Amino acid sequence: MRTELPPGRLASLRALLAILLVLAGAAHSAPRLAGLDADTSSVTVSGLSSGGQMAVQFHVAHSASVKGAGVLAGGPYYCAGGSWWTAYYNCMTPRLYTPLPALALLQAATDALAKTGRIDSTSHLATAKVWLFTGSRDETVFPAVVSALADYYRHYVKPANVLLVRDLPAGHTMPSADPDVTHACEVTEPPFLNRCFDKSIRAPYDAAGALLAHLMGASPAIPAAETGAVTDFDQREFVKGGPSVISLAETGYLYVPAACRTERCRVHVAFHGCRQYADAIGTTFVRDAGYNRWADAYRLIVLYPQTIARSGWGADGSFVYNPNGCWDWWGYTGADYHTRTAPQIRAVKAMVDRLGQAR
């Protein structure tokens, strides 16, 4: 025999269930990103693959405050021109009938964006430091693409400040000296962190250490052990309508050296690559890419913003096709994906600005 609840009682139970679901979500959400009085006037960025492309976009869009970029397997700014087809065929695997876009056209587009105020003046790029890496066995993003990025930057940046590393037989990866990294150098598979032997120093190549040394202009001694800790933070407040609308995760990560809890430190933003976000590989990139041990030496707060994989229509009516959790470098969040008003760039900039607020 079926018993029907009175309409009023049923409504009350539904309201209670809604409240419990909200409270449950709040109980499991990451803490709010705190202000750490960071120096946000001299930010540096880096990333692999789509993260490298995002590092380039973030650098060019905010060159007044971003003073350097480290890019692994990334191409020239606005290479895709808002087209997924161009992104894949021309800007990742260029061939005879799908060549890289002419640099003169990409530079003209950059200049036009700067003239209209949609990105910072390119004059700020002149003194920037740029470190680039391509593996000679990378068949995902051809070495020629990274060479084109070097040429793009040399148009704006003092040539001596642009360093291109291309002599390691690496696949599509970020070489790391972290002891937990065991993938062979030429392998291309998650978590896209590989061990590559550097014959010149007879030790594993440390991309994070190499790029930070170039960007920061020094190479201090690394502490015997990390002094800080990796913590998570809530990314939801940085995107109106929720982060999933633009394929961002609800949770991001942060590494703060012990000294930066009391001293004023600079900020480095590390953008993971496709299929390298936390929902796919956990905190492997955050913990093993190699940034954290150098952050102690350089007095750097390392921000690790996170994406998610998303394909199809969202509850808000938005459509996003991003099955590999890539950063947007071809326009899935809108036509302005590469400018200061780009949804993902705006969200990450807000995170950096929060770190600059008082403790």
Image: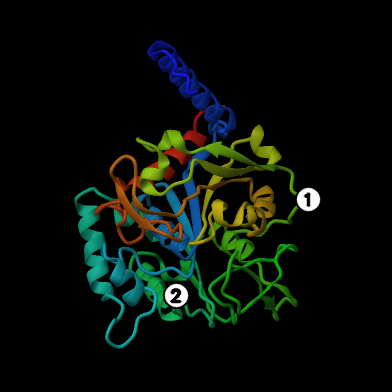
Q: Position of residue 175 (x, y in %)?
A: 62, 69
Q: Residue at x 40, y 55 (%)?
A: 59
The amino acid at mark 1 is: Ala
Q: CB atoms at circles 1 and 2 under 8 Å apart? A: no
Query: Which of 177 and 96 lies nearest the eye of the viewer?
Result: 96
Q: Position of residue 263 (x, y in %)?
A: 64, 35
| Residue sitting farthest toward the right | 224
Name which residue type carries label 2. Val
**Callout 1 crowding tier (Cα within 10 Å): few <14, some 14–19, many ≥20:** few
Q: Is residue 282 above or below residue 168?
A: above
Q: Residue at x 47, y 64 (%)?
A: 130
- Badge 1 marks a residue whose secondary structure is loop
Percent from the top left, x then y, of residue 318? 29, 46
* Residue 211 visible in rendering: yes
- Look at the image and tell me in which quarter the C terminus lies: top right
Q: Indicate the colouring scheme.
A: rainbow
Determine the residue positioned at 58% across, 32% down: 28
Q: Residues within 10 Å of mark 2 (few under 14, many from 20)?
A: many
Residue that label 1 marks: 225
Q: Position of residue 71 (x, y in %)?
A: 48, 65
- 1 or 2: mark nearer the eye: 2
Among numbered discs 1 and 2, the one appearing first in the sequence:
2
- Label 2 sits on a secondary structure element that is loop
Distance between the alpha carbons at the discs numbered 1 and 2? 34 Å
What mark, if any, has residue 338 been given in the picture? none
* Rendered view: 273 above or below 231: below
User: What residue would you read off at disc 2?
Assistant: 141
